[in-house]
Image: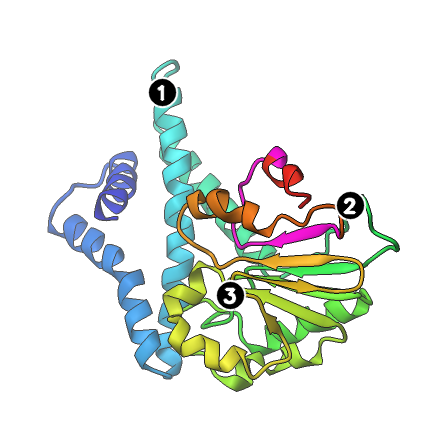
Amino acid sequence: FFLLHYFVISSYFSYFLLSKDLTFYLLTFLLTVSYPLAMLIEKKSEAVLSKYFYIISSVWMGFLFISFSVILFVKILGLFVSFNKYVGVFVLLISLSVSIYEVINSLFIRIKNLRVPISGLKKNLRIVQLSDIHLGSINKDNYLRKVVEKTNAQKPDIVVVTGDLVDGSAPISTHMVDSINKLDAQTLYVIGNHEIYEGLENIMPILKKTKMKILRDTVFESKDIRFIGIDYREGNKFLNDNIRNYKSGKKKPSILLYHAPSLKADTLSKNNI
């Protein structure tokens, strides 16, 4: 993480002909620790300043990774073509422009409609999938309220929440997830990696008080379809090794609910999923 910061900040210093003195190393150190420190403070404090510190450090993280990508591209391109002295200005403007666009883009909730043919389904179902809402320091209860309103406007038959409902950046309260109870349809939920970061012992008692049906390595069956909810685990070896345990045969079509699925299509089709 420090080396990533060192690479980006060192590149900017070189582009703008700044000397790498004590200021450079101090700036690199402070920016490196800013995000981890902001996370630690935000988990312990409810002060407004800590929230702004977390938001600013999060935006910096985005700018850091975008800058890294742009700088790396320019350095590789520089092996074949030569750049003039304004290359640093170009890199900075591109990185800033993309960062600003991404921040603005994050403010909008867009709906993507997909029509999925499912063999054996007796009637059409309207399913809304919600994922990676990341309730915490940035996305709060009012954000979830907007998501719920847009979801209800779709008039779903069923709603599935496929992990990372919480971010892990701030303590989650019952009040923060209350809007989930205003969903107009049966709601199923599986955990993601950020629920694990938050601590399942902390988050599950709160989520169990909501209307969501929590699926943890289990199956929910409706009249025409089955939903297989599997806990998130690092890597997909567990999923690959155990998905056959949920084989449905020809009785009902099945939908897998998993936070980060990467199973091959033939693995699923063999098990009628």
> Is residue 144 shown above or below 133?
below
Q: Is residue 86 visible?
A: no
The amino acid marked with disc number 2 is Val
Which mark identifies residue 134?
3
Residue depth check, mark 2 versus mark 3: number of the one nearer the observer: 2
Q: Is residue 217 visible?
A: yes
**In the rendered view, does 54 fall on the left or right side of 262?**
left
Please state the horizontal and vertical placement of residue 93, each as a whole percent of the image.
Answer: 46, 41
Name the residue located 53 percent from the left edge and 78 percent from the top edge.
207
Instruction: Specify the segment rendered in magenta.
Output: 252-266
Residue under numbered circle 1: 78
Which amino acid type is shown beneath numbered disc 3? His
How many other residues sit within 10 Å of disc 2, few (<14), some (14-19) or many (≥20)?
few
Picture residue at 86% right of the left edge, 55% below the top: 124
Q: Residue at x 82, y 67 (%)?
A: 155
Up the image or down, 152 lies above or below 114; here it is below
Q: Please say whether residue 101 is one of the residues in the magenta stretch.
A: no
Of pointers 2 and 1, the one earlier in the residue sequence: 1
Mark 3 neighbour class, 10 Å CA radius: few under 14, some 14 to 19, many 20 or more: many
Q: Residue 42: name its quadrant.
A: bottom left
Decide which of 14, 85 is in the foreground and name it.
14
* First-in-chain label (2 vs 3): 2
